[in-house]
């Protein structure tokens, strides 16, 4: 069989082993080469990725590649597909990337990126759920510190004070409290993946409203 390491776009496992399970060869009239569509599956979650390779039978180099490809078409050889064909196929879907809103202060963007990276891994590793939740809560703390530097007060007090002083509208205060509450659950490792997804959404919306949207308004 042919196996290789790849970041799974489905479960989030990093450099997990994928196994090539088969291929389909097609002659396409619109292009002067045969197209091989290859399926590989994640050994952790079982979901698949695909790649397409093209070989032009009129090209001597491609003829050599075709012969080698067909020789190993039963996948019983131990060679890696990448070594065999001497190039990297483009596997789809691609692994997701951290979602970081524009116009965030650097320290907040860095904190959010870390939480996002842990979130992407949490789909395949439950241990990452709590760590990611803590990261989103820490992101909120960094954001509130820019709005009010009363760091000697607890997060609950600071959110209420920001709303009372008009620095946060009530709806954003409610968002912040929800992030705080879910973040507290993460501290005690008492948070589910669904709740983590909710925590992520509230954090993203809070940051977009507080930093991204105001920065997009033209200065007169």
Image (tube, grey):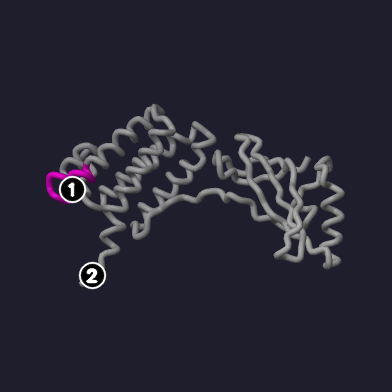
Residue for point 18% across, 44% down: 170
Q: Position of residue 55 (x, y in %)?
A: 78, 60
Total label count?
2
Q: Position of residue 11 (x, y in %)?
A: 55, 38
Q: Decide which of 133, 95 is in the foreground and name it.
A: 95
* Magenta residue check for 91: no
- Depth check, front residue: 105 or 170: 170
* Position above or below: 168 against 155: below
Give the residue at mark 2: 219
Q: Is residue 82 above or below residue 192?
A: below
* Residue depicted at 46% across the width and 41% down the height: 119
Q: Earlier in the sequence, mark 1 or mark 2?
A: 1
Q: List the residue tagged with mark 1.
A: 169
Q: Secondary structure at mark 2?
A: loop
Q: Which mark is residue 52?
A: none
Q: Return the residue nearer the eye: 125 or 158.
A: 125
User: Mark 1: which secondary structure?
Assistant: loop
Residue 56 image point, x, y percent: 79, 64
Q: Residue furthest front?
A: 29
Q: Residues within 10 Å of mark 2 (few under 14, many from 20)?
A: few
Residue at 72% in and 43% down? 20
Q: Quadrant of the N terminus?
A: top right
Please provide percent x and percent y for residue 51: 67, 52
| 14 with respect to 116 (left or right) | right
Q: CA distance from mark 1 to mark 2?
A: 22 Å
Taking the magenta stretch, the answer to whether it contains residue 165 is yes
Q: Is residue 185 left or right of residue 145?
A: right
- For residue 168, side relative to residue 38 (left or right): left
Q: Which residues are magenta?
A: 163-173
Q: Quadrant of the C terminus?
A: bottom left
């Amino acid at each position: 069989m042919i196996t290789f390491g790849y970041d799974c776009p489905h479960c989030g496992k990093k450099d997990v082993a994928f196994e090539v399970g088969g291929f389909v060869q097609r002659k396409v009239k619109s292009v002067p080469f045969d197209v091989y569509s290859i399926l590989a599956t994640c050994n952790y979650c079982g979901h698949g990725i695909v790649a397409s390779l093209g070989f032009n039978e009129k090209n001597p180099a491609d003829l050599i590649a075709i012969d080698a490809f067909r020789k190993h078409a039963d996948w019983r050889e131990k060679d890696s597909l990448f070594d065999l064909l001497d190039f990297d196929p483009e596997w789809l879907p691609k692994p997701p990337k951290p979602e970081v809103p524009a116009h965030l202060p650097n320290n907040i963007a860095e904190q959010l990126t870390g939480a996002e990276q842990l979130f992407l891994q949490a789909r395949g590793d439950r241990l990452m759920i709590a760590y990611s939740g803590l990261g989103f809560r820490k992101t909120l703390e960094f954001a509130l510190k820019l709005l009010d530097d009363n760091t000697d007060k607890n997060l609950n007090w600071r959110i209420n004070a920001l709303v009372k002083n008009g620095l946060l509208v009530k709806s954003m205060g409610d968002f912040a409290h929800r992030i705080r509450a879910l973040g507290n659950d993460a501290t005690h490792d008492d948070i589910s993946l669904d709740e983590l997804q909710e925590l992520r959404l509230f954090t993203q919306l809070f940051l977009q409203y507080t930093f991204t949207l105001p920065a997009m308004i033209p200065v007169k």
